[in-house]
Image (cartoon, rainbow, N blue to C red):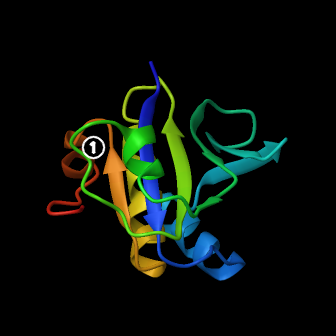
Amino acid sequence: MSKDIVVLAGREVSEATFGAAVRVAGEELWVSGEDGVLWFSEGEGGRVLFSVEVPVLVRVPGEVERVLGPGVRPVAVPVWFIEVRASEVDGAEVPAMRFAAELSLQLDGSVWADDPAYAERAGLRGAS
């Protein structure tokens, strides 16, 4: 089962912020993509660790909370919704969470994960 992580960003992603997040996730990652999804693998032809979908600008109040479910704190809109999905590979949530945390830091955002333990496993204690 994949592991879901979402970056809720206050600003739009640029090439520079995206590149910085990739470096934090792991410089040895191989990036490929098609149809609006980027896949990050363990080197060329290696196992896919995580994917990132095209950012979506959410303008409707309450939409983020509806998508992420009960217990999500209210989110001010407009906000960029960036879905990061770690694969079933053991430990894949670590580079995925590092990527998401760096992206959120660069874009004045926050991170939501379907399991709060991802942040701790990625060495990001206190990450939100």
Whether 86 is drawn above or below 14: the answer is: above
Q: Residue at point 55% right, 79% down?
A: 11
User: Residue 51: image x %, image y %?
Assistant: 61, 42
When asked about the image quadrant of residue 76, the answer is bottom left
Q: Residue at point 34% right, 51% down?
A: 112
Q: Which of the two residues, 8 or 41, is positioned nearer the viewer here?
A: 8
Classify residue 36 as left or right of residue 42: right
| Farthest-out residue, top | 1
Classify residue 124 as left or right of residue 22: left
| Farthest-out residue, front | 61
User: Residue 95: image x %, image y %?
Assistant: 44, 50
Q: Which residue is mark 1?
A: 118
Q: Which of the two residues, 69 or 123, is positioned nearer the viewer here?
A: 69
Q: Which of the two residues, 71 or 60, is positioned nearer the viewer here?
A: 60
- Residue 68 visible here: yes
Q: Residues within 10 Å of mark 1 (few under 14, many from 20)?
A: many
Q: Secondary structure at mark 1?
A: helix
Classify residue 84 as left or right of residue 68: right
Q: Residue at point 64% right, 58% down?
A: 55
- Specify the quadrant that holds the C terminus: bottom left
